[in-house]
Image (cartoon, rainbow, N blue to C red):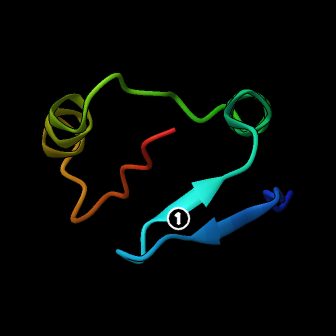
């Protein structure tokens, strides 16, 4: 299993931030992780696939 690695940190609201969005998206593509344009799209995908939970990362 490949682990995602990037230079990241948390902001004052405890949201994860990445130093290079382009690199983060490329790593997700390599892992065949589908990006969604909005949180609503991700939520609808999770519901339609009967997933109990999901994590939406804004990059």
- Nearest the viewer among 57 and 7 is 7
The residue at the point 75 percent across, 39 percent down is 20
Vertical comparison of 43 with 37: above or below: below
Position of 9 with respect to 5 (left or right) is: left
- Nearest the viewer among 40 and 32 is 40
Q: Residues within 10 Å of mark 1 (few under 14, many from 20)?
A: few
Position of 7 with respect to 34 (left or right) is: right
- Residue lying farthest top? 37
Quadrant in the picture for the N terminus = bottom right
Vertical comparison of 38 with 4: above or below: above
What percent of the width, then of the height, locates residue 7?
Answer: 81, 59
Q: How many marks?
A: 1
Q: Please, what secondary structure does the residue beneath circle 1 have?
A: strand
What percent of the width, then of the height, locates residue 40?
Answer: 15, 34
What percent of the width, then of the height, locates residue 8?
Answer: 71, 63
Position of 15 with respect to 52 (left or right) is: right
What percent of the width, then of the height, locates residue 36?
Answer: 38, 26
The residue at the point 23 percent across, 34 percent down is 45
* Residue highlighted by disc 1: 16
The residue at the point 35 percent across, 74 percent down is 13
- Nearest the viewer among 32 and 7 is 7
The residue at the point 21 percent across, 65 percent down is 52
The image quarter in which residue 27 lies: top right
The image quarter in which residue 5 lies: bottom right
């Amino acid at each position: 299993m490949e682990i995602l690695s990037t230079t990241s940190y948390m902001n004052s609201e405890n949201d994860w931030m990445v130093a290079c969005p382009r690199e983060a998206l490329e790593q997700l593509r390599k892992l065949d992780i589908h990006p969604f344009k909005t949180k609503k799209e991700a939520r609808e995908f999770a519901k339609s696939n009967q997933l109990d939970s999901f994590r939406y990362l804004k990059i």
